[in-house]
Amino acid sequence: MNLGNFLAAAARRYPHKSAVVCDGKKISCLTLQSRAEKLAGSLYRYGVIKGAKAAILSYNSIEYIEIIFALMKLGAVCVPLNHRLTPQDINELVHHAGVETLFYDQALEPLVPFGARDIKNFIVTGCDKSCDALSYDSLFSSPAGSYPDQKVTMADESFLIYTAGTTGRPKGVVLTHGNQISNTRNYTAAYGMQPQDIELAPTPLFHSSTLGRVFTYMYNCATFILCRKFEPESCLDLIRKEKVTSITQAPTMYQIMLQAFKQGTWDTRSVKRVVTGASPMTVRSKEDLRNLFPCAGFFDLYGLTEAAPGVSILTPRDFERKALSVGTPMLSVDVLIKDESGAAVPSGHIGEIVCRGKNVMKGYYHDPEATADALQQGWLHTGDMGMLDDEGFLYICGRKKEIIISGGENIYPGEVEKVLMEHPCIHDAAVFGVPDDTWGEKTVAAVVLKESRLCAEKEIIAFSRKHLAGFKCPRAICFLRELPRNAAQKVLRKELQKYFL
């Protein structure tokens, strides 16, 4: 079995059902299968064979999905690129990956590394002609080409996805067909996805969570709606127009959508499943979701690219009862909490979250040292700190490398942030450590106040002291208009530290 089989099976089961919707265009399962087959034949003639690296630099589109499935059928390795990076960043990634074919959206042409020596084929979508690249449409103009059976198996590599790089240089995560198929089965079991589902997918396809869901949609023959760019009003309009039943996105996106929802009139009652992930969501934000989606059940997903990405899921049954948790391990995932010596710690104690399962990555591309550090005795060391309660529910406390050690005491940013987000004037908050001559490090909080709300530093510190041990409380408050975040909506604490270094 391989990922290319998913589309072929969907085309047999529901040939005329809409598979993908984007920018007002729809494509059926059968047409998508036919175009992916034809594209695979054309790409084979251009040297895209099993194991070859092909990158995609594009906004969300139907073409993006066609390319992914064509590459999966060929056994080529797809390298999705973050279009929010700089040209230099992209050039470094394609060089590191050894990309030979690059698909790109014409609108992103200024980012394209045309001078990259390894790239043999530049293929542009969104235009008919380009002096520097092949036209994507031209690959469909010639008679259908065939390609030999590549004998793609579960063990073969499918994706090379670069991490967001919140703690340093991005690393290339190698995922196999088996990793993605295992994640698909876990997602299916967790969400109870069915063919009648219509999912809105506004998050970018270069994100591992979105890619993982694409295969889940196809496996279950569900229709999914891509957004070229996230615009809250457009998303709300799509929900009404397409009778969307499910949506998955980051907490920040829900907050933006909620503000737009309050200023207009939209019917969101068709939505029955709402999934949040990528970063922690406060209890208050979870309560706000009830106003936005009054008829939905809510899920909170914890995952990481190295796990393809699903690790644990909080389901509607426990969404309110265990509001601070990210749920229990997914169907075929094992989770433990370990201390610095590698020993498992009892429930209620904080340590590093480790997990194992068939969804866990093959390793980091061309980085044996980092691979050995992350994969130890069959367990993926996530770098996230957390704990399990007596019922086996997982709680996230922060990144291992983000722990603040002040006066010999460990302080977990996530714990402090949860308290700050309960303050009535605070819209967003991030906690980090900076050097201190007396304590080694001191805790600092960057906060974004709600619109039209004023609050003094001393008031926020006093509020934290009511809910936290004294050594955990922020020693200083930095007021910002917004927090710096990467494409996955994760806070860039290193950028915040620069204000104090």
Image (tube, rainbow, N blue to C red):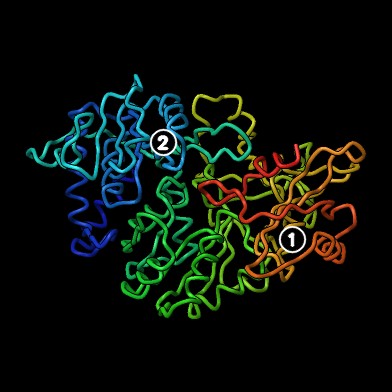
Picture coordinates of residue 112, whole percent (x, y):
35, 32
Q: How many marks?
A: 2
Q: Residue at x 30, y 38 (%)?
A: 104
Q: SS at mark 2?
A: loop
Q: SS at mark 1?
A: loop
- Where 450 falls versus 385 (above or below)? below
Q: Which quadrant: the N terminus?
A: top left
> Left or right of 239: which side holds 359?
right
Picture coordinates of residue 95, whole percent (x, y):
42, 24
Residue type, mark 1 in image: Asp
Neighbor class of circle 2 (other Cα within 10 Å; few <14, some 14-19, many 20+) is some
Q: Which quadrant: the C terminus?
A: top right
- Where 380 falls versus 282 (above or below)? above
The quarter of the picture where residue 55 lies is top left
Mark 1 vs mark 2: give the one in front: 1
Mark before the other along the chain sequence, 1 or 2: 2
Closer-to-camera residue (169/262): 262
Q: Residue at x 77, y 41 (%)?
A: 343
Determine which residue is flagged by label 2.
Answer: 155
Determine which residue is flagged by label 1.
Answer: 389
> Left or right of 247: which side holds 421?
right
